[in-house]
Image (cartoon, helix red, strand yellow):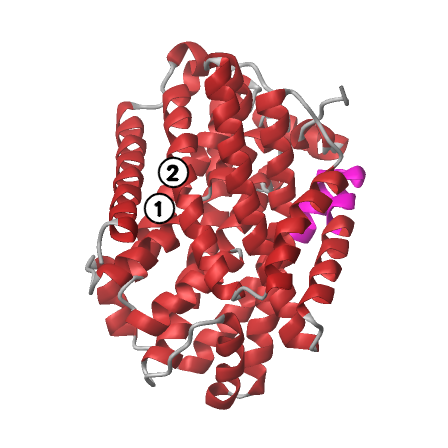
């Protein structure tokens, strides 16, 4: 059996660890931001999953069809994501093991195998969305045929994943750089479209649906925002990154990780909202029917100028490349945790390319495929969230970092809401005409 590794133990930096230990022990005399810096990173890697091409597809369709109506869904789902990512990070800090490893230890073998298969299917759906998004972006920006763009996407993600051998900081820097590119791109788009800020404020805080199609898109947005593979990955990124045993140091470490999560997820939430706002202000406002990413790119140019289309393409490319790399990392964590089995990342990358190339070769609509993949993701969420809430509520397991009652209540309500939405989606899909 190949040797097992995980992202947290594979990507160590002695200088960063030394700085982190000095801060946690109270010996650091640096300023506040300098003390925070060694702890930033894991949430930024996980947060890329929240601005992947699936978000582009669902947010653009949501904005084009329903204006600003679904902004409250983005706000609510990002708040849930922030809570769940913090719990995932806390599990790794408190126990030194990730979510998949705890599932393997605490559930029966048939349940473990079933969960592994389900999470692998979710990871494949995720990878399909990310891979297609980057391929579409290369096609739009450079005119490459989709199948060539797909192969080029695979090569670039190989190179990004290769940064792991140089430590976790280079990989975190590249992923954070991609996130910055996406964020800056949508800041530019917001300034170009001149949205209605009063209506945005209303639709952000007043929940409502127009019809069943808006509920379907809302579920897709939820599936595109709260990501099961990111929940598994985050616990692995923190499980061995900075190891402390003293209760007060664990509390202090978790507080820093909460800041990491808050900053990263605030950026991701703002980008998601900006996607929908740009689409609503550009397409819904003018009555333009936009059903695909290609149409969004081409339609932006005559409405807002060529620069807007290029900025959109660059953001989509950055999203696809970075999230595809993170998806491969998450797949490794899931396989290692559930099965105690490791395969090289390049082998997993090759295997996960195949479904995407098949979709491209058959000629399926990439945008529709992206939206469907996000709905698939939403069905995997309960199987990540319920074990996470259960484990982080176990005092014997978590020690001083065990959930408070209000935390467990909020996380439990999130799980119930997600399961309820999924059952409603099943009903709408198979029983309503």
Separation of residues labelled 2 and 1 (CA atoms): 6 Å
Is residue 248 visible from the viewing direction of this image?
no
Asked if marks 2 and 1 touch (Cβ < 8 Å), the reply is: yes
The x, y position of residue 248, in whole percent, is: 48, 19
Residue sitting at x 62%, y 29% = 335
Residue 83 circle label:
2
Helix, strand or loop at mark 2 = helix
Q: Which residues are magenta?
A: 160-176
Q: In this orientation, does residue 368 appear?
A: yes
Left or right: 170 with respect to 328?
right
Closer-to-camera residue (218/375): 375
Mark 1: secondary structure: helix
Q: Nearer the viewer, residue 239 or 363?
A: 363
Q: Determine whether 314 is above or below 40 in the image.
A: below
Picture coordinates of residue 303, whole percent (x, y): 46, 88
Check if residue 196 falls in the magenta segment. Answer: no
The C terminus - image quarter = bottom left
**350 over 153 or under it: above or below:** above
Is the residue marked by circle 2 packed among few (<14), some (14-19), or many (20+) residues within 10 Å?
some
Instruction: Please give left or right for residue 3 compared with residue 130 in the image.
Output: right
Residue 268, given in percent of the width and then of the height, sits at 47, 54
Task: Using the image, determine if residue 366 lies above or below residue 111.
Answer: below
Q: Is residue 287 left or right of residue 318?
A: left
- Quadrant the N terminus occupies: top right
**Was residue 174 drawn as part of the magenta stretch in this picture?**
yes
Q: Which residue is mark 1?
A: 79
Whether residue 177 sits left or right of residue 377 in the image: it is right
Label disc, if present, on residue 48 of the rendered structure: none
Residue 150 picture quarter: bottom right
Overall secondary structure of the magenta section: helix
Q: Residue at x 44, y 55 (%)?
A: 372
Q: Name the residue rendered at 27%, 42% in the picture.
A: 423
């Amino acid at each position: 059996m190949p040797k097992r590794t995980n992202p947290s133990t594979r990507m160590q930096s002695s200088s960063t660890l030394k700085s982190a230990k000095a801060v946690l022990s109270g010996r650091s005399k640096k300023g506040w931001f300098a003390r925070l810096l060694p702890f930033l990173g894991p949430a930024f890697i996980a947060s890329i999953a929240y601005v992947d091409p699936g978000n582009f597809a669902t947010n653009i369709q949501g904005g084009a069809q329903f204006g600003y109506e679904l902004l409250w869904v983005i706000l609510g789902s990002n708040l849930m994501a922030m809570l769940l990512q913090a719990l995932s990070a806390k599990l790794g800090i408190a126990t030194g093991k990730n979510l998949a490893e705890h599932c393997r230890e605490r559930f029966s073998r048939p349940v473990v195998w079933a969960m592994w298969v389900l999470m692998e299917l979710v990871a494949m759906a995720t990878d399909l969305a990310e891979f297609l998004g980057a391929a579409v972006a290369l096609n739009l920006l450079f005119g490459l045929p989709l199948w060539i763009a797909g192969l080029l996407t695979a090569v670039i993600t190989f190179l990004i994943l290769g940064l792991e051998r140089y430590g976790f900081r280079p990989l975190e820097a590249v992923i954070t750089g991609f996130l910055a590119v996406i964020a800056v791109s949508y800041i530019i788009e917001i300034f170009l479209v001149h949205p209605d800020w009063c209506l945005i404020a209303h639709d952000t805080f007043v929940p409502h649906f127009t019809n069943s199609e808006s509920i379907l898109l809302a579920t897709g947005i939820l599936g595109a925002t709260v990501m099961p593979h990111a929940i598994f990955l985050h616990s692995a990124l923190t499980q061995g990154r900075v190891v402390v045993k003293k209760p007060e140091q664990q509390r202090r470490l978790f507080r820093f990780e909460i800041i990491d999560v808050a900053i990263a997820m605030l950026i991701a939430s703002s980008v998601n909202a900006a996607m929908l706002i740009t689409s609503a202000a550009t397409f819904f406002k003018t009555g333009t029917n936009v059903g695909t990413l290609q149409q969004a790119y081409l339609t932006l140019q005559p409405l807002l100028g060529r620069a807007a289309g290029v900025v959109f393409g660059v953001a989509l490319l950055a999203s696809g490349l970075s999230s595809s790399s993170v998806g491969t990392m998450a797949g490794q964590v899931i396989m290692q945790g559930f099965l105690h089995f490791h395969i090289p990342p390049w082998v997993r990358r090759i295997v996960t390319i195949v479904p995407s190339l098949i979709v491209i070769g058959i000629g399926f609509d990439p945008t529709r495929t992206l939206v469907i993949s996000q709905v698939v993701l939403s069905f995997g969420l309960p199987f990540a969230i319920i074990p996470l809430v259960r484990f982080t509520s176990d005092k014997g397991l978590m020690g001083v970092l065990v959930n408070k009652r209000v935390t467990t209540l909020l996380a439990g309500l999130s799980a119930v809401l997600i399961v309820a939405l999924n059952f409603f989606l099943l009903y709408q899909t198979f029983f309503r005409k």
